[in-house]
C-alpha cells in the first residue's frame, strides 16, 4: 500500500471511530436518562458593523472651554459629584464623565471639558449632557469628517442632565434614528459610540443590566436610568446608546466607580426622557415637571406590618401640601401609594420619575392603601417649581386651650398639648398633634425621638391632644409594634417602635 493510500485509510478509520464513539456516548446518555445535546448550531453573536457604519457620522465630539471663574465652578461641581455631597462616600462613588484629553496638562484640565453628543435633526440640533457644557464660555463640536463647528447651547436641564445644542453646518447633516426606551428589557444587546479619553468614535457593546434604576441622587430624583455593562469611561458623557435596530435608546451619563474608571456598571438616561426635555426646550425654553404635592418615605418591614401590607413596597405619605392636587384629591398622611397610572410603586424612588414626566394639569390615577383597604384616587397633577423644590406651605391655626399632659410608659415618652405659640411656630393646624415633652424610656430613645417633636398620628389615627394620645396607646403591650407619624421641624416621617417582649430585649 503506498503512502497516500495508507493516510486515507488511517483517516477513514479515525473518523469511523469518532462517529461510533459519539453514537455510543449518546446511547449511554439516553439509557442513563441524561438529555442528549441538540445538533442545532449555536446562534452567533450579533454583528454591529452595520449599526456603526450607519450612525457614526451622526455622533460628535464635544469640547467645552471655560474661563478661570467658570473653571473653578466646574471643578467644584466635579469634586462634589452628582449628589453635591463631597463628604458622602456613597455618593462619591458616582463620577461624572468629565472626559479629559489624552495626557493633558494640569492647566488644560482646568479649562476644558470633553464629552460626546449626537445629531438628532438634519438642521443641526445636537443632544448631550448638561454636565459636559454647563456654564461653558464656548462649545465646539467635531464631526466625523473632521469639521469643527461652534455650537450654541439652546437650553439645558440639570435635573435630567440633558442639554440641547445647535450648529450651523450650511447644509443637511447626518442624524440618528430615535428609538423607544420603554421597551428595553434586561439582557438585550446595546452599543455605545463616543469619545472616551479623547479617542473619537470608540465603539463598545454590552447588554442591558437593569431598567428603571434610581440612583438616589438629590440632583436627579426624576430620572430612572438604564443600567448596562457597556464599557463607558470619561468622555463618553452625552454619547448615544443604540439597540440592535440602530436606534438611540439612551444617553450615556454616569458610571459607578470608586476609581473614576469603568467597573462594569454604567447608566444612561432613557431617550424618552431626553426627547421630552428637547421638546420642552424648543417650545418653552425651559423644562417643567409634574408635582403630586406629597412628602413620602420608604416602607420598612415593621411599617409594612403596621400598614397590613404583604411586603415592604409602596410609598408612605407623610405630608400633604396645602392647595396641591393631592390635598384636593383627599390624600392624607398615612396613605400608602401602591401604583401610579397602573404602574406598581416598589419603592419611594419609583414615584418621582413617573410624576415628573406627567404634564401639569393632566389627571393621574393612584392606587392607595388606606386603613388596610385598597382604593383608586384621581389626582390633578400640578407643576413643580422651576428650582425643583416643592416646599410644604405652613398651615395656620391657633388654640388657647390649657395644656394637658400624658404619655406612654411602654413607648418611653411623655407628651403634652401643643400651646398656641408653638402651634403657630410649627405651622400646625388647630387640634393637630401632641408635643413630646420628655423621653422617659429606651424604646423612644432608640429610634431617635426628641423633646419638641410633634406626634401627629398613632397607628394611622390622628391625635389632637394628650388625652387622645393616652387613649390611642393604652392597649399597647410587649411585642407590639406602634407606628407614629412624627413632625420634626418642617419635615414629617413615620417611626415604628417595637415594645420589647422581655427585660432581656431592652439592652
Image (spheres, grey):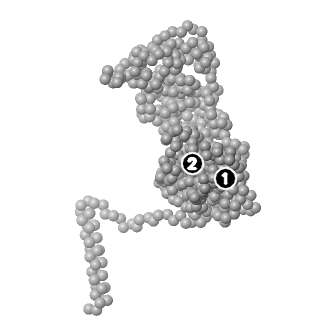
Residue at the spot of label 2: 96
User: Which residue extends farthest top?
Assistant: 402
Q: Going 49% across and 57% down the picture, which residue do you hit?
A: 206
Q: Going 61% across and 18% down the picture, which residue do you hit?
A: 425
Examine the rendering and report whether any part of residue 164 can be seen.
Answer: no
The N terminus sits in image quarter: bottom left
- Taking depth in this image into account, of 331 and 133 the one nearest to the observer is 133
Q: Going 24% across and 63% down the picture, which residue do you hit?
A: 31
Residue 27, image x and y in percent?
A: 25, 67
Q: Would you place residue 165 above or below residue 41 in this image? A: above
The C terminus sits in image quarter: top left
Examine the rendering and report whether any part of residue 496 can be seen.
Answer: yes
Q: Secondary structure at mark 1?
A: strand
User: Which residue extends farthest right?
Assistant: 170
Q: Residues within 10 Å of mark 1 (few under 14, many from 20)?
A: many
Residue 126, image x and y in percent?
A: 67, 54
Residue 171, image x and y in percent?
A: 74, 62
Task: Please indicate whether residue 161 sits to the left or right of residue 11 in the image.
Answer: right
Q: For the residues marked 2 and 1, what is the alpha-carbon distance in whole angstroms?
A: 15 Å
Q: Secondary structure at mark 2?
A: strand
Q: How many marks?
A: 2
- First along the sequence among labels 2 and 1: 1
For the residues labelled 2 and 1, say whether their Cβ atoms are less than 8 Å apart.
no
Task: Please indicate whether residue 21 sits to the left or right of residue 181 in the image.
Answer: left
- Taking depth in this image into account, of 31 and 68 the one nearest to the observer is 68
Residue 95, image x and y in percent?
A: 54, 47
Give the numbered dot on residue 133. none
Residue at the spot of label 1: 64
- Taking depth in this image into account, of 232 and 114 the one nearest to the observer is 114
Q: Residues within 10 Å of mark 2 (few under 14, many from 20)?
A: many
Q: Going 57% across and 66% down the picture, which residue do you hit?
A: 50
Amino acid at each position: 500500500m503506498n503512502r497516500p493510500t495508507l493516510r486515507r485509510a488511517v483517516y477513514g478509520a479515525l473518523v469511523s471511530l469518532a462517529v461510533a464513539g459519539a453514537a455510543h456516548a449518546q446511547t449511554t446518555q439516553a439509557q442513563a436518562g441524561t438529555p442528549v445535546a441538540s445538533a442545532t448550531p449555536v446562534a452567533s453573536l450579533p454583528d454591529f458593523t452595520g449599526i456603526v457604519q450607519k450612525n457614526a457620522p451622526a455622533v460628535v465630539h464635544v469640547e467645552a472651554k471655560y474661563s478661570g471663574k467658570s473653571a473653578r465652578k466646574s471643578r467644584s461641581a466635579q469634586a462634589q459629584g452628582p449628589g453635591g455631597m463631597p463628604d458622602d462616600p456613597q455618593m462619591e462613588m458616582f463620577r461624572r464623565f468629565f472626559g479629559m484629553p489624552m495626557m493633558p496638562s494640569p492647566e488644560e484640565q482646568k479649562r476644558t471639558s470633553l464629552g460626546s453628543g449626537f445629531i438628532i435633526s438634519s438642521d443641526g440640533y445636537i443632544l448631550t449632557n448638561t454636565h459636559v457644557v454647563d456654564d461653558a464660555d464656548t462649545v465646539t463640536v467635531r464631526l466625523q469628517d473632521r469639521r469643527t463647528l461652534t455650537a450654541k447651547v439652546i437650553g439645558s436641564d440639570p435635573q435630567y442632565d440633558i442639554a440641547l445644542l445647535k450648529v450651523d453646518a450650511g447644509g443637511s447633516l447626518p442624524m440618528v434614528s430615535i428609538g423607544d426606551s420603554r421597551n428595553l428589557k434586561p439582557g438585550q444587546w446595546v452599543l455605545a459610540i463616543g469619545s472616551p479619553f479623547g479617542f473619537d468614535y470608540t465603539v463598545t457593546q454590552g447588554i442591558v443590566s437593569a431598567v428603571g434604576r434610581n440612583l438616589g441622587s438629590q440632583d436627579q430624583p426624576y430620572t430612572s436610568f438604564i443600567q448596562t455593562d457597556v464599557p463607558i469611561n470619561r468622555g463618553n458623557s452625552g454619547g448615544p446608546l443604540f439597540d440592535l435596530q440602530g436606534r438611540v435608546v439612551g444617553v450615556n451619563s454616569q458610571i459607578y466607580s470608586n476609581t473614576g474608571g469603568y467597573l462594569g456598571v454604567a447608566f444612561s438616561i432613557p431617550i424618552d426622557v431626553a426627547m421630552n426635555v428637547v421638546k420642552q426646550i424648543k417650545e418653552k425654553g425651559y423644562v417643567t415637571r409634574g408635582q403630586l404635592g406629597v412628602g413620602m418615605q420608604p416602607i420598612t418591614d415593621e411599617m409594612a406590618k403596621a400598614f397590613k401590607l404583604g411586603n415592604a413596597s409602596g410609598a408612605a405619605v407623610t405630608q400633604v401640601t396645602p392647595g396641591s392636587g393631592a390635598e384636593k384629591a383627599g390624600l392624607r398622611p398615612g396613605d400608602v401609594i401602591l401604583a401610579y397610572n397602573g404602574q406598581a410603586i416598589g419603592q419611594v424612588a419609583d414615584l418621582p420619575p413617573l410624576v415628573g414626566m406627567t404634564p401639569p394639569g393632566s389627571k393621574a390615577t393612584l392606587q392607595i392603601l388606606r386603613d388596610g383597604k385598597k382604593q383608586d384616587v384621581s389626582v390633578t397633577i400640578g407643576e413643580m417649581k422651576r428650582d425643583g423644590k416643592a416646599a410644604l406651605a405652613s398651615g395656620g391655626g391657633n388654640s388657647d386651650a390649657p395644656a394637658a399632659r400624658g404619655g406612654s410608659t411602654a413607648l418611653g415618652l411623655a407628651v403634652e398639648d401643643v400651646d398656641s405659640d408653638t402651634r403657630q411656630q410649627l405651622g400646625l393646624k388647630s387640634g393637630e398633634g401632641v408635643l413630646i415633652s420628655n423621653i422617659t424610656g429606651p424604646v423612644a430613645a432608640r429610634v431617635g425621638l426628641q423633646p419638641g417633636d410633634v406626634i401627629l398620628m398613632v397607628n394611622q389615627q390622628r391625635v389632637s391632644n394628650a388625652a387622645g394620645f393616652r387613649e390611642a396607646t393604652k392597649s399597647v403591650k410587649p411585642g407590639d409594634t406602634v407606628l407614629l407619624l412624627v413632625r420634626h421641624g418642617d419635615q414629617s416621617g413615620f417611626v415604628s417602635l417595637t415594645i420589647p417582649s422581655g427585660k432581656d430585649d431592652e439592652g
